[in-house]
Image: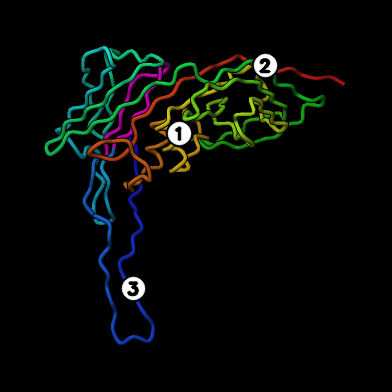
Amino acid sequence: MRKFKVGILFLFLLFFSGCVRNEIEETPWTTASVPMVFSVISPDYPVELYLGKSYFEKDAANPIPYPEAKVFMRGQDSAWVELKLQSADTSSYKDVDHLLGVVKGKTYYLRIVLNDRTLHAQTTVPVNGATIIEATCTVPAGNVQSNRKYSTENKAETIRKKRSTLSVNFTLPQNKDYGYYLSAFSTEIEFHGPYDSGFYQDNEFQCPYDNSAFTLNLITVDPYLKKFRFSETILFNQSYDDDFITAITSTFGGVLPAYSNIENGMGLFGSFSTDSKLITVTQLTE
C-alpha cells in the first residue's frame, strides 16, 4: 500500500499593514478535484496504471477514489484490453493476462470511463532510440572503497563500493523530441553535460565492491515523459528498477502536475525503450 502525503500551497489571505481592515481575495484556481492518471509503458515491463485524484488539505485521500472506473488500453492494430484493479487498498490497474504486447514504434491508446467523464491519451513507444556503442568500467589500483548506508523498510545496511571510471560511447536518434538517461544498479546515473555529445565519462562512478560485471541501461523516453520529467524535476535515482509509476506516485501528494497529456483529466501516459549492455569491471594493477 502506498501512502501519499496530503498537501498543496495556495494563497488565501492578504494582509496590508497600516490598513484598518483585512481583505480576502478569491483564488483564481479551481478547487475542484480531478482524476489523476500515471502510466508509463515499455516493451520490457508489464502494463500498469495508477488512477488517483487531486485533493486539497480539506479532503481525505481515498485509496480507491473512482471505484466505478473502467480502464482500457489498446495498440494501434488491436482491440481494447481492460486493465484490472489490483487490490482494495491501492488504485493500481494491470494487464494481468498480458494481452497487450508493447512494441517499439507502435502507438498505444488509453481510455478510462468514469461516471461523469471519459479520459483519453496516447503515446508512441520510441523506436530506433539511443544505442550504446561501447562502454568500459575500470577500477584504479588500490581499490579505493567507500562505505554507504542504505535504509530499507525493515533494516539499514552498509554496502561497500569502489570508485571507478565509467566511460560510455553512444549514438542518439534523429528525433530531438526524445529524452535520454543512463542507469545502472536500478539507479539513474547523474549526467553532466549535453547528451548529444555522444560520450559520457564519470571518474567517480560508485560500483558495488563485489561486482565483476553489471548491466548498463541507456533509456529513451517519449516526448510526453521527457516534458513531464522536466516540469516535475523528478529524478529516478532510487531503487525502483526503472519503475516510473512508482517513482512518480511516490512523489505525488494530490497536487496538480505542471504538465499533463491526459484529456479530461491530469497526469501522464508515456513510454520508453531501453538499450542495455553488460559491462565487465576491469581492475587495474600497479
Mark 2 and mark 3 lie on one chain; the one further toward the N terminus is 3
Of the 4 image quadrants, the one containing the C terminus is top right
Query: In the rendered structure, are the residues bearing label 2 and label 3 in contact, judged by CB atoms less than 8 Å apart?
Result: no
Q: Label 3 amino acid?
A: Leu
Q: Name the residue under label 1.
A: 226
- Magenta stretch? 37-52
Horizontal side, residue 179 vs residue 42: left or right? right
Determine the residue located farthest toward the left in the rendered image. Answer: 115
Residue at screen point 29% across, 79% down: 22
Helix, strand or loop for disc 3: loop
Of the 4 image quadrants, the one containing the N terminus is top left
Q: Against 216, is 11 above or below?
A: below
Q: Point out the frontmost of discs 2 and 1.
A: 1
Query: In the rendered structure, are the residues bearing label 2 and label 1 in contact, judged by CB atoms less than 8 Å apart?
Result: no
Mark 2 and mark 1 lie on one chain; the one further toward the N terminus is 2
The residue carrying pointer 2 sits among few (fewer than 14), some (14 to 19) or many (20 or more) residues within 10 Å by Cα, namely few
Magenta span main SS:
strand
Q: Foreground residue, 145 or 280?
A: 280
Q: How far apart are marks 1 and 3 (CA)?
A: 37 Å
Q: Against 193, is 106 above or below?
A: above
Q: Distance between the residues labelled 2 and 1?
A: 33 Å
The residue carrying pointer 3 sits among few (fewer than 14), some (14 to 19) or many (20 or more) residues within 10 Å by Cα, namely few
Q: Name the residue under label 2.
A: 212
Residue at screen point 66% across, 22% down: 168
Q: Does the magenta stretch include residue 62?
A: no
Q: Foreground residue, 176 or 127?
A: 176
Q: Position of residue 140 (x, y in %)?
A: 79, 25
Q: Residue 14 carries which label?
A: 3
Horizontal side, residue 117 vs residue 77: left or right? left
Mark 1 and mark 3 lie on one chain; the one further toward the N terminus is 3
